Image (spheres, rainbow, N blue to C red):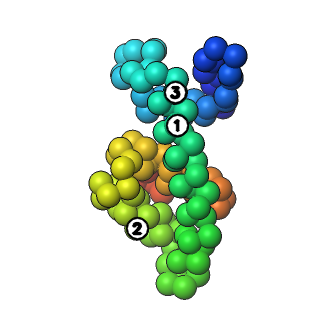
């Protein structure tokens, strides 16, 4: 499900799951302005799209389960060198699994 965040004349549909990364528990308003959330979403969506081919090749080359591939990618994204927050890294991996039609591993639900 997507949530519309409007800014002036511009309306871009951002996934509710992504906007939720910027809403503290018990609150309804994001902690960041529209522009920041939209930029971060674009970065994370691009990252997920770029990783699809690499993930599929890694799974084929290593002959491992999809969950193992996603775990390796999550570790790389969470290293701090990517500039992604831990929540954003988790979202990218979930989006990657969605793009590849792979099941979400149980460790992603935590």
Helix, strand or loop at mark 2: helix
Q: Earlier in the sequence, mark 1 or mark 2?
A: 1
Name the spot of residue 99 as percent of width and height, x first: 65, 56
Query: Which residue is depicted at the point 58% across and 78% down?
Result: 57
Badge 2 density bin: few <14, some 14–19, many ≥20, Cα 10 Å: some
Q: Residue beneath label 1, please?
A: 39
**Residue 68, image x and y in percent?**
44, 69
Distance from label 2 to label 3 (Cα)? 30 Å
Compared to residue 46, the image places residue 59 above or below, namely below
Instruction: Name which residue lies at 37% across and 16% down.
Output: 26
Location of mark 2 (residue)? 72
Q: Which mark is residue 58?
A: none
Picture coordinates of residue 34, whole percent (x, y) = 52, 23
Marks 1 and 2 close (CB-CB < 8 Å): no
Measured in 3D between alpha carbons, the distance from the residue under mark 3 to the one under mark 1, in whole angstroms, is: 6 Å
- Mark 3 highlights which residue? 35
Residue at the image point whose x is 50% and y is 31% from the top: 37
Q: Position of residue 110 (x, y in %)?
A: 38, 45
């Amino acid at each position: 499900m997507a949530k519309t965040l409007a800014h002036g004349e511009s309306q871009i549909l951002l996934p509710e799951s992504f906007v939720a990364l910027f809403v503290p528990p018990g609150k309804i308003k994001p902690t960041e302005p529209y522009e920041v959330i939209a930029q971060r979403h674009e970065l994370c969506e691009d990252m997920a799209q770029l990783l699809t081919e690499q993930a599929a090749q890694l799974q084929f080359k290593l002959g491992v389960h999809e969950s193992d591939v996603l775990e390796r990618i999550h570790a790389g994204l969470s290293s701090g060198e990517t500039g992604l927050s831990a929540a954003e890294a988790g979202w990218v991996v979930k989006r990657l699994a969605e793009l590849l039609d792979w099941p979400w591993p149980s460790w992603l639900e935590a």
